[in-house]
Image (tube, rainbow, N blue to C red):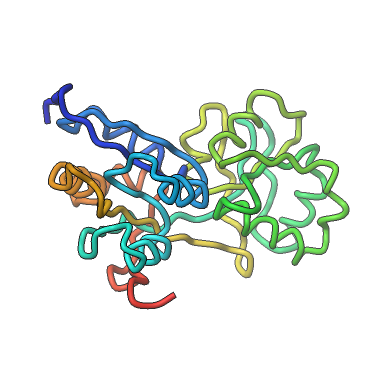
Amino acid sequence: MSRDSDKKISLLCAGAAQGLVEALSEQFDARLQCRFGAVGAMREAMFAGEPCDVMVVTTKMIGDLQRAGYLLLGSESELGEVATGIGVRSGEPLPDVSTEAGLKSALLAASEIYFPDPQRATAGIHFASVLTRLGITSDVSCRLRTFPNGATAMSELVARSLPGAIGCTQITEIRRTAGMECVAPLPDGYELRTGYCAAVSAQSPRSKLAAAFVRLLTGPETSALRRKLGFENSPAAAMGIASD
């Protein structure tokens, strides 16, 4: 598509999908005004009345916002699932995190541990619970470094962490960060795969244009790019629109 500079749509978008949106921005025939961040922060921005034509957050949150009247029913389309994973700075040794014992050992040995907001970010909330379940929260508390979203956490790890630091966030955020290497998803028993979805705002004055971007973002022509960035296929039935 040739982009029309006179047309613009606004996005509130989870950080897990930032790399995908940025990669597709030049293919769309309108300018994109994007705010990226933790899903909780995106919901708060919508509630506060921030401009939004397209919302890209977790599948469950899309359903909640549709039921509340903020997003158009029937406008939703899935991007796929994203695993929460472990990353390190490029060039550093890759820890073995394939088992519970390996993950626990790697975290205890880490010089610092970077992850997103444990109150509002999907990966941050989950990782805080992982530390609790492993029984090491107090052991590593002085080495925890939290940031508003996963993209910022990984960028800060690259820029200022001590050697031997570990990061945990959505794999899509690790892969899009220059200087980071994705080690692996969290091991069995601690894994998290989160479905992401896009939908059109019920208040959008540009709903047709917004729907066209949702189709580009989630359509078959961009499926290879989504897989490359870390999105996995998820069943269309798992929309969560009808239940929590």
* Identity of the residue drawn at 24% across and 36% down: 9
The residue closer to the viewer here, 224 or 91, is 224
Count the marks: how many? Answer: 0
Horizontal side of 27 relative to 172 (left or right) equals left
Counting from the top left corner in percent of width and height, residue 108 is at 82, 49
Which residue is at the far front?
49
- Quadrant of image for the N terminus: top left
Counting from the top left corner in percent of width and height, residue 40 is at 52, 52
Which residue is at the far bottom?
243
Horizontal side of 40 relative to 239 (left or right) equals right
Tell me the quarter of the picture where residue 82 sits.
Answer: bottom left
The residue closer to the viewer here, 46 or 32, is 46
Horizontal side of 162 relative to 208 (left or right) equals right
Horizontal side of 119 relative to 177 (left or right) equals right
Tell me the quarter of the picture where residue 181 sits.
Answer: top right
Q: In this rendering, is residue 4 above or below 134?
A: above
- Quadrant of image for the C terminus: bottom left
Q: In this rendering, is residue 153 above or below 44?
A: above
Tell me the quarter of the picture where residue 233 sits.
Answer: bottom left
The residue closer to the viewer here, 93 or 34, is 34
* Identity of the residue drawn at 27% across and 34% down: 24
Counting from the top left corner in percent of width and height, residue 45 is at 45, 45
* Identity of the residue drawn at 29% across and 73% down: 237
Counting from the top left corner in percent of width and height, residue 107 is at 76, 49
* Identity of the residue drawn at 41% across and 36% down: 35
